[in-house]
Image (spheres, rainbow, N blue to C red):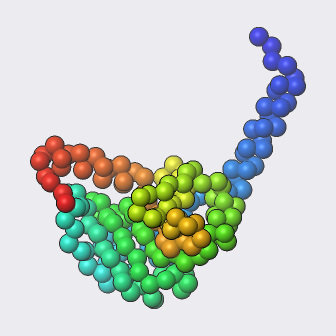
Amino acid sequence: MMLSAKFVAITVILLATCGVALAETESLPRGTAPIFLGMGKVDFEKITGAKSEACLECVTHEDRYVLLKTKGIFEDTSIPEGADASFFSGRLYRLGIGFEERLEKALPQFRVKYGPEKRHIDWNNGISAYIWEDGQTVLEIHHGTNKSQAFALFFEDKLLRRQLQDQYEKDKKAGIKRD
């Protein structure tokens, strides 16, 4: 079957256009200096001075940290106080930091930088999230359901999160209960 020259030309133009659009967006960030997804727990503790929190709902090999004071830790001094970090098997899989920005300003900037969000979720607790994903990272902007003010950014490592979910299933089969 012969393809028409017009069909081939349109296909090439569409593919080239998509390629340019993809090339213009950045990979999703994996944290903010000096804390990045995948970093080790020991390095995190050296940088932050934090110690792991007791975590009743954590799965085996999961640790959580809550940082109330973050001034002087992050290179970006505009980050508000407070952060939380979750580790699985000694590696950072989820990082949450304060983010005080009006959505009408933040969303266009994120869309230009990372492309359109993959989805938007409204939870029943009055919190919503715009979510971007690539092959290894999930980036979430959390905001109130009134959609005016963002209050947190979350970075998540997809592979480590999948491993954590697998561990949860193993714990469940072994009869380990979580609160």
State the residue in front, 178 or 147.
147
Image quarter in which the C terminus is found: bottom left
The percent position of residue 21, horizontal first and vertical second, equals 73, 50
Image quarter in which the N terminus is found: top right
The percent position of residue 57, horizontal first and vertical second, equals 22, 61
Residue projecting furthest to the bottom: 72
Residue at the image position 36 percent from the left and 65 percent from the top? 92
80 with respect to 174 (left or right): right
Residue projecting furthest to the top: 1
Residue at the image position 24 percent from the left and 74 percent from the top? 53
Residue at the image position 75 percent from the left and 38 percent from the top? 15
State the residue in front, 136 or 82.
82
Q: Quadrant of residue 6?
A: top right
Q: Is residue 32 visible?
A: no
Marker count (numbered): 0
**Is 139 above or below relative to 65?**
above
The percent position of residue 18, horizontal first and vertical second, equals 73, 44
Q: Is residue 147 visible?
A: yes
**Is 8 above or below relative to 159?**
above
155 with respect to 161 (left or right): right
Residue projecting furthest to the left: 175
**Is 136 above or below relative to 148?**
above
Residue at the image position 67 percent from the left and 71 percent from the top? 105
State the residue in front, 21 or 99.
99
The percent position of residue 89, horizontal first and vertical second, equals 27, 59
